[in-house]
Amino acid sequence: MSTNFKARDMAEHQITELDEQLLRRKLRTTESPCDAKARVGERELKAFCSNDYLGLANHPKIVAALAEGAKLYGVGSGASHLISGHSIAHDLLEKKLAACEEKHIPKARALFFSTGYLANINAITGISRLAEQGQASIYSAKLNHASLIDGVRLASAQNKAKVTLFDHQNLDSLEESLKQDTYPLKLIVVDGVFSMDGDIAPVEKLLHIAEQYDALLMVDDAHGFGVLGEQGHGILEQAGVHSERIIYVGTLGKAAGVSGAFICAASPFIEWLIQKGRPYIYSTATPPAIAHTLLSSLELIEGDEGVSRRKKLNELIQIWNEEMTFSSWEKTPSSTPIQPVILGSNANALAVAKLLDEAGYWIPAIRPPTVPVGTSRLRITFSANHSVDDLRELIQELKIIEQTVEGNV
């Protein structure tokens, strides 16, 4: 038997390189429900790193709904939606999600997926197939999430879609490119809330451009659904837009506290994605108990409790913006629960994350390729379950750590 194993040697070599570049990621195992505090091993840490913005992941009503859903529908779906896996629970959820966005998308219809990654890939590759090969243009924001980037790459590989990147904070180049575009299908793809910076896409301006140049606008509102808008319906509600050109993707594993995602668009687009969206066609349907659980989550998001939790989030955001100042670190202003602190090098980010961990805080260092080289950071996120005292204690700790790090330079 040969003792050579080149693939293993390559893996070990490249992992060593990641270690040398301070880019190797490591798993940490929690032993408690997702909440403002997390038990990791024998320690309890104050967690300012999850996307459970409304603090619903361990809400007793949602926990009870999951148990009820399992009793009603069991724990598996057994097949893809188009075989036998489409439950009444999925149907009810999709109708409710469409109702959330119907003020903003005419003839709205929704399609439920097990993850946001899957929903984004399905939307981009499926919509691009509306045109003949080589007859679609995709305009993708440079800082889009990895799932959008991968969806665009697949559309380019599968359907030879032409891809152009643009800066979401400066739309002149986007407009200039669209002026010269003669393809029958043009798709603008953008995050609603950019996950590493916390800034909000100019959806109204983008929609105006889409209408002017006969394009579709796809918005991935992973970090906006549940958080933005009076009822928590996301960036479309906050922006007050209305158009059949919008392809909307919302995530249900962040502010909604459960799992999954959905695409919402005008009925013809959704019907096309059912027929031609490969991830939808060939994936086993999410357990119907999850869909049943999400109905309770949506009820909380839209109701008085959702309003109260968003108010609490906004209070925390305001306190952070008013009271957190740094002398050498860069704080990126954000009106969302995502508050980045730019530290520059991988070494700096890891060192500060380690000091925070020692002080009882869980805020991991975010490094390339998740963010551009030289912009490694802390990605601090707020939950409605954080108290004002929790936040002010974190602010004090960060000020102490910054002084400590500066004193050791």
Image: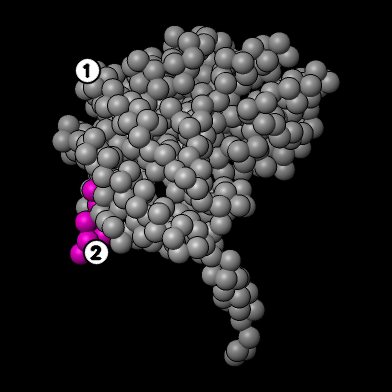
Is 6 on the left or on the right of 361, as rendered? right
**Residue 244 found in image quarter:** top right
Element at label 1: helix
Is 29 on the left or on the right of 23, as rendered? left
Residue for point 50% across, 37% down: 332
Residue designated by label 1: 304
Residue for point 43% across, 27% down: 335
**Residue 141 found in image quarter:** top right
**Residue 308 found in image quarter:** top left
Residue for point 27% across, 40% down: 392
Residue for point 39% across, 59% down: 404
Can residue 395 be seen by looking at this rendering? yes
Relative depth, front residue between 383 and 215: 383
Where's residue 2, x and y in %? 62, 89
User: Mark 2, residues whose alpha carbon is within 10 Å: few (<14), some, or many (≥20)?
Assistant: few
Where's residue 247, x and y in %? 55, 22
Relative depth, front residue between 164 and 125: 164
Relative depth, front residue between 393 and 195: 393
Relative depth, front residue between 107 and 212: 212
Amino acid type assigned to the residue bearing label 1 in the image? Asp
Can residue 364 be seen by looking at this rendering? no
Farthest residue to the front: give it. Answer: 407
Q: Earlier in the sequence, mark 2 or mark 1?
A: 2
Against 358, residue 104 (above or below) is: above
Residue designated by label 2: 41
Quarter in which the N terminus is drawn: bottom right
- Look at the image and say whether residue 41 sits in the magenta stretch: yes
Per the rendered image, the range of residues in magenta is 37-44
Q: Label 2 to label 1, Cα distance in Å?
A: 36 Å
Against 230, residue 116 (above or below) is: below
Is 64 on the left or on the right of 150, as rendered? left
